[in-house]
Amino acid sequence: MSSFYLTTPIYYASGEPHIGHAYTTILADVIARYRRRAGRDVLFLTGTDEHGQKIQEAAAAQGMSPLELCDLMAGRFEAAWAELGISHDRFIRTTEAEHRAVVTALLERLRDNGHIYEAEYAGWYSVGQERYFTEKEIGPDRVDPIAGEPVERIREKNWFFRMSLFQERLVRHIEDYPHWIVPATRRNEVLGFLNQPLADLSISRPRSRINWGIPLPWDDAQVCYVWVDALTNYVTASGAIDPAAPKEERGFGDPRPARWPADVHLIGKDILTTHAVYWPTLLMGADLRLPRKILAHGWWVVGDTKMSKSLGNVVDPLDLRERFGTDAVRWYLMREMPTGQDASYTPDRFLTRYDQLANILGNLVHRTLSMVKRYRGGIVPGGSADGLARETEEALEAYHEGLGGYRLHEGFAAAMSLARRANGFVESQEPWALARDPNRSGELDRTLATLVRTLAVLAAMFEPVVPAKARELATRSGLDGVPRFAELRTLEVGELAVTPGTPLFPRVEARPGSFG
Ligand code: MSP
């Protein structure tokens, strides 16, 4: 079975999980579930980013040690992911001993390769973004260009990585692989950034200022810059590096069959530069392969501003969950935001998307299973289930194109359109009329079998996004779990015992106005 490795950003352990984190993590979960259903051996990684000035300051403000705060917050993230049905295989924390050892090994490798030097540095630092910005980027107001928060002037001795050395190679890579950074707007943004000479990257901070980090192996007075530490998590979890081995056998420069490189790094557009410039050049410097793809999605915005905790405009996804269920929230987030673009949350759009689930998919399930019960005693008739063949084929093709090509909204639109066509099939076949005519009993059998077969296909298509509901749909249809895509072709539905039950997506009377 071929493997598939995907990652989310690791989230700062200084704040509570919110809808922004939830979006990326659900997006990753949907892709992971899709690939598993398609037969891939998936490694799905998420976790928390626990070192650096931001965490140190947040802990101090709350009268806790940094590790106490991180323990608390890592627990919150894990609990939030459990509630949202996230199926990650590994939750990494950058304070883990294994990770610290891999970061140390990476730093040693960079230094042994001659890419590290020491220098005095003066620049504008943003604690919120944990990085330096240029004069041009901060503008006359001296705020970071991402969150608009004030930056601080810092002058100190740092160790540097010769990032500039890899500029040309990086540009060539981006040009040679047009789909390496998607969507294209983000690729162009990175190419634009690389039009200017690339500066070297400061990779350390003096301990006198920040103590909370991984010490440099050759200079105990400095800790590793938090972004270098954080990005390395992707390699740590892949198992490609064995930090305990002698230097030459640690796995750098070695194309051995570990999980590295990642198939896709999912990120928000706010952390594009760190992932598409810092990270690949660090990997080049350490003789490691580059990730196969970087997918930068847009922001959930309210009006013109990014939804964020500090702006106080955060919609807590867990609030929506209580009223509509986890799967409805997942569906909304995936179906509403065109993958890669910004989208704004509105209660009306949420309801519209929920109504699709209830009135199209839910309705199809309910009427199909009820008719099997009413007309055939709850047992799906054997024989031909060959209706809707072309429609199913077309929908599956568009679906795989959408999900495989990271345009998830298009894939799920195709899945919903199959459910819509199946409802149309019910109306055109008029099973209630067939049931009254003893001469047309074969036609009724074929109609019901076709519909149940379509439900099985829909269970597979919808499972990545609404996993609990899809399992329920499969169970009610008498199936032994949600089928894998490869099983659909030969799937037999005759003799399955169905149970209609209550509506899969109940009507929710309350308007969701209060959660905007
Ligand atoms: N710790 C760094 C990432 C290190 S990865 C090696 C970090 N953490 S974060 O907690 O700030 O999370 C940022 C990520 O959260 C974004 O890249 C994005 O995936 C997600 N989002 C945060 N707010 C968001 C929205 N309003 N909308 C969509 N996603 C957003 O940066």
Image (tube, helix red, strand yellow):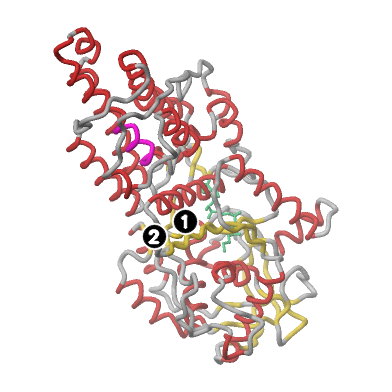
- Say few, some or many: other residues with alpha carbon within 10 Å of mark 2 (under 14 / 14 to 19 / 20 or more): many
Q: Tag 1: Cα neighbours inside 10 Å, few (<14), some, or many (≥20)?
A: some
Name the image quarter holding the C terminus: top right
Q: Which residues are magenta?
A: 453-461
Tell me which residue sits at (19%, 31%) in the image. 387
Taking the image as shown, residue 271 lies to the left or right of residue 155, namely left
In depth, the one of 442 and 145 nearer the eye is 442
Q: Quadrant of residue 292?
A: bottom left
Mark-to-mark CA distance, 2 and 1: 8 Å
**Left or right of 166 in this view: 235:** right
In the rendered structure, which amino acid carries the disc numbered 2?
Arg
Q: Point out residue 265 in the picture as x, y percentages from the top left corner.
A: 47, 61
Q: What residue lies at 48% left-to-right and 27% top-to-bottom?
A: 347
Q: Nearer the viewer, residue 415 or 438?
A: 438
Q: Is residue 46 left or right of residue 1?
A: right
- Do labels 2 and 1 touch, CB within 8 Å? yes
